[in-house]
Image (cartoon, rainbow, N blue to C red):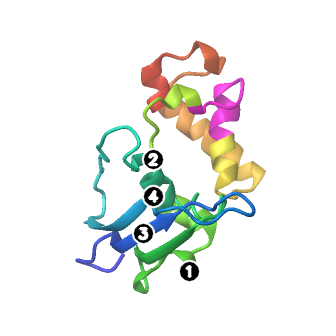
């Protein structure tokens, strides 16, 4: 990361959801959002229900518009170690997910597998690691936090880890 530069920059960022086929585009869900995040910072997005918190977070990690469509305007940049601030689209999806990620309000609602090992492996698979590396990282991660049981029996504090 280039020294002194923020890790993430949004400038005048707006986002419109992809309309249903044959329908006109609606008003923007995000309008001219601007902020910077320093390296290592944890950011809380706070607002009323329907204010665009989840939409903003899903734009930051690239779910919108990359996977579910929509249109954006403005600038979203991440700090690359060699090139400084670059457009986040210049990074491969797996690299973007390593730099910007999110923790859901109810992490237990995002569990998709039956065991802790499978759940941790599912996340690593999203980063496009090869299976041997996934297994090595699963073992290392679970040795750090401890639980190795059916995910439905996990306490909420373990799920957040």
Secondary-structure class at tag 4: loop
- For label 4, the residue is 29
Secondary structure beneath label 3: strand
Residue at x 56%, y 39% (from the top left corner): 140
Q: Which residue is farthest left?
A: 4
Residue appearing at x 41%, y 42% in the figure: 50
**Contact, CB < 8 Å: mark 2 with mark 1?**
no
Q: Which is nearer the eye, 63 or 131?
A: 63
Q: CA distance from mark 2 to mark 3?
A: 14 Å
Residue annotated with mark 1: 90
- First reached walking from the N terminus: tag 2 or tag 1: 2
How far is mark 2 from mark 1, CA to CA? 23 Å
Crowdedness of circle 3 by 10 Å Cα count: few (<14), some, many (20+)?
many
Q: What element does badge 1 sit on? A: helix
- Which tag, 4 or 2, sits closer to the chain's start? 4
From mark 1 to mark 3, how far is it between C-alphas?
19 Å
**Residue wearing tag 2:** 54
Q: Nearer the viewer, mark 4 or mark 2?
A: 4
| CB within 8 Å, label 3 to label 4 | no
The residue carrying mark 3 is 14
The image shows residue 108 at horizontal and vertical percentages of: 54, 26
The region drawn magenta spans: 110-121
> Cα distance, mark 3 to mark 4?
7 Å
């Amino acid at each position: 990361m280039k020294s002194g530069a923020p890790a993430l920059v949004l400038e005048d960022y707006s986002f419109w959801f992809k309309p249903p086929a044959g329908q006109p585009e609606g008003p923007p869900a995000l309008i001219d959002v601007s902020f910077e995040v320093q390296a290592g910072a944890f950011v809380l997005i706070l607002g009323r229900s329907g204010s665009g918190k989840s939409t903003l977070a899903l734009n930051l990690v690239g779910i919108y518009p990359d996977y579910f469509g929509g249109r954006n305007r403005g600038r979203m940049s991440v700090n690359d170690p060699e090139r400084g601030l670059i457009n986040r689209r210049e990074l491969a999806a797996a690299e973007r997910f390593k730099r910007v990620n999110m923790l859901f309000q109810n992490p237990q609602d995002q569990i998709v597998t039956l065991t802790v090992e499978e759940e941790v492996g599912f996340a690593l698979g999203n980063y496009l690691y090869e299976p041997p590396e996934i297994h090595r990282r699963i073992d290392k991660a679970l040795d750090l936090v401890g639980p190795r049981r059916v995910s439905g029996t996990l306490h909420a504090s373990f799920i957040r880890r």
